Each structure stands twice: as structure tokens, then as C-alpha cells.
Image: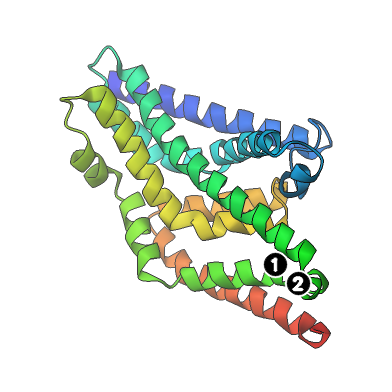
Amino acid sequence: MRAQSDGRLFAAVVIGLAATAWAAVAWLDHGHGAGLTHESLSDVQLDTAEAGAAAVFIGGWLLMTVAMMLPTTLPLVTLFVRLTRRRQSSGALLGLVLLGYLVAWVLFGAVAYVFDVGLHRLVESDRWLHANTWLLLALPLLGAGIYQFTRLKYICLDRCRSPFSFITESWHGRRPAVEALQLGWRHGVFCVGCCWSLMLLMFAVGVGNLVWMLALAVVMGVEKNLPWGRQVSVPLGVVLLTAGLTVVGLHANSIA
């Protein structure tokens, strides 16, 4: 009974954190916080120091990660809580797992931000790209669609869908703090490997777009957690490829 109670408590904490993050993103989305969402996250470096712009972006990215990705870790979180419930430091150990997980996503976000800034500067300096910015939507859609059919996608997805085997490989309890942090980090790396192409779509449609955030969060949650979720990957790939090709078809005649 205590194991179930602890598992529910920590699951409630994770869900509460995600709900708080969603509320914060929604608040920012409605014009608060000096424009931390939408395209301003990509363009803010034009108006402020680059270091400050990067910090603003990372803060927004962390909010999105907590809102969108943290709920998908619930199977692993509840299982880890059951395994460590007898330890006095069980709460701290779970915190280290979540910290490692979020660090993996924040590092990915930092790399994505640097790439996005460089891409925007390239578009501004290249007349042809500036005249064909629709490519910034078509290419991520096509890339995400193609990735849905790759072997790496399924390797990472299968690892994310197997929390028990994942924990037994990473957690032995001899160095609890280090192992908990490594467990979260490794889970985060595989989660990034599974979902990075979908998260990059946020840059195409506007970082902080609540409709896209909700849609992608649902899709990634289904893929990773529901028994039939793996079957979603191929249809999703077809949808993304179709959307990308549609964008290309609509603008092909405008290529100059």
C-alpha cells in the first residue's frame, strides 16, 4: 500500500510540475514576460546581448520540456519510486533522476538554439533563402517524417518504452546519487533520440505555440507509453511527409 501511495504522490508531483509549466507557457503566450515565446525566441538576439538571449531561450525551452516531456517519464518515475521507497533519500534520488533527464533536453535545446540562430542569420544574408523562407517549414516536416522510418528512431523508442529493463541496467544502488543522475541522463538521451525531430518542428511553427505543443506532447506521450503507441510512428511519418510535400507543392512555382 505504501509503495502505491508513494508512487501516486510522486506521479502527482510530476504532473503538478508539468501543469505549472503549461500554465507558465500559456501566460507567456498571451503577451507577458517580454515575449519569451513564438518566433521571438529565435529572433531575440537582434535586440539584446547574445548571452542574455540564449538564457531567455533556455528558460523557455526548459518550460516546454517540463510541460511536454516530463509527463512521458511517468512509467519510469513510478517504477523508480517503488524500487527506492525504502531509502530515506528516495525523494532526493528521484530529483536527481529528473535533473539528469532535463539536463539532456536542455543541452539539446542549446544546440538547437545555436543552429537556429545561425540559420536565421544565413537566411537574412542570402537573398534566395530570404525569398523562400517556406523551406524553413517544409524541410523540418520532411526531415521529421523521414526520421520516423529510421532504425535509430525505433531503437530509442523501444528503450523509452521499456522502463523496467532500463532501470535494472542503470540502477544497482551502490552509488545511489551518481546512479540516479546517470539513470535520468541516459533516459533523457534516449528520449532526445526518439523525439528530437518532432521537437525541432517547434522552431518551424514558432517556439511556444500552444496548439503545436499540445499536439506534439500528445503524440510523443502516445508513442512512448501506450501499449499500441509504437504503431503510431509509421502513420505519423506519413502525415509529416505529406504535410512537407504539400508545403513544397504550394510554393514550388515561387522558387526563383
Residue matched to label 1 = 137
* Quadrant of the frame with the N terminus: top left
Which residue, as the protein is rendered here, is positioned at the far bottom?
253
Q: Determine the CA span between mark 1 and mark 2.
A: 12 Å
Q: Is residue 225 visible?
A: no
The image shows residue 172 at horizontal and vertical percentages of 16, 31
* Residue occupied by mark 2: 129
The amino acid type, in three-letter code, at marker 1 is Leu
Q: Is residue 220 left or right of residue 100?
A: right
Drawn side of residue 169 relative to residue 252, left or right: left
Residue 236, position as x, y percentages in the image: 53, 68
- Disc 2 packing (10 Å; few <14; some 14–19; many ≥20): some
Q: Nearer the viewer, residue 73 or 109?
A: 109
The quadrant in which residue 242 appears is: bottom right
Specify the quadrant of the image occupied by residue 141.
bottom right
Q: Quadrant of residue 17?
A: top right
What residue do we see at 76% from left, 85% from top?
A: 252
Which color mode does the image show? rainbow
Percent position of residue 205, x then y: 71, 58
Q: Residue at x 47, y 65 (%)?
A: 232
Which sits earlier in the primary sequence, circle 1 or circle 2? 2
